[in-house]
Image (tube, grey):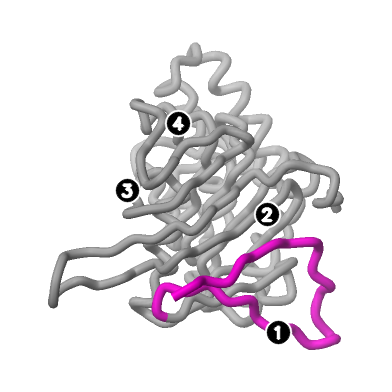
Amino acid sequence: MTDAKTNRPLVRLDRISKHFGEGETRVDALRNVSLDVYPGQVVALLGPSGSGKTTLLNVIGCILDPSSGSMELDGEAVIEDGQWLRPNLRRLRLDKIGFIFQFHNLIPFLDATDNVALVLQLAGAEAATARARAVELLDYLEVGHRRSAMPAKLSGGEAQRVAIARALANRPRIILADEPTAALDSKRAGIVMDLLRKVAVEQDAAIIAVTHDEKIFDRFDSIFSLRDGRLEMEERGDDQREPDVFQCSKSVS
């Protein structure tokens, strides 16, 4: 695993807050969240419904504006004092971030290869180049033998691996996963998480996953909980994976 002490974090949050509404209707979804995630790390975000975990993932994914705070992604300052420093957030997402969801959301009328290649073509790659990269990724994720299969013919685990390939298409080093194994049984969930760990280590990527799936907790380096918008590190038993260096500044109310 990459030594976090000698590398810059891929994700750095500094006192990120997000509120909705004003006055008596104001809801504080995130409260001064500070967090560093380094290359090679796989991190879990836990929390009950409404705790702010999806809000946090959407801020990191450059989908939702924060109310205050600063953020760096892959060494680039992208938010300062709650303001975006880049005008083109779509390009920022294409360049730096891959998304994986609970349901694979594959396009039903495209085969596995074209589902992955489409992302590259949208980013400007030639069709042949995009398909070659797609095949490479499907092989890497051990689902290359299904490259010509339509989504309806894929098992749940195979479809999720194709979705992971799609998330990796543009070589992002930050992977955000929202309940990536919730629709899978224990065996397939373990396979998917082992593949994500492989991606993190071999491609020096940072993976942040929102999950409630207790059967995969041992696959994470560190586990954090969001409670009322505040980030807290979870204590871990001796039988669990020893976490790597991972910094989290607890919220200040």
For marks 3 and 2, give the CA distance.
27 Å
The circle drawn on residue 65 is 3
Q: Compared to 197, does 232 lie above or below? A: below
The answer to whether the residue labelled 4 contacts the one labelled 3, judged by CB atoms less than 8 Å apart, is no
Splitting the image into 4 quarters, where does residue 7 fall? top right
For marks 2 and 4, give the CA distance.
22 Å
For marks 2 and 1, the one nearer the N-term is 2
For marks 3 and 2, the one nearer the N-term is 3
Residues in magenta, as a range:
228-253
For marks 3 and 1, the one nearer the N-term is 3
For marks 4 and 3, give the CA distance.
14 Å
The location of residue 230, given as percent across then percent down, is 47, 74
Query: Which residue position holds label 2?
Result: 196
The location of residue 164, given as percent across then percent down, is 57, 47
Q: The residue tagged with tag 1: helix, strand or loop?
A: loop
Side of 82 where 177 appears, left or right: right
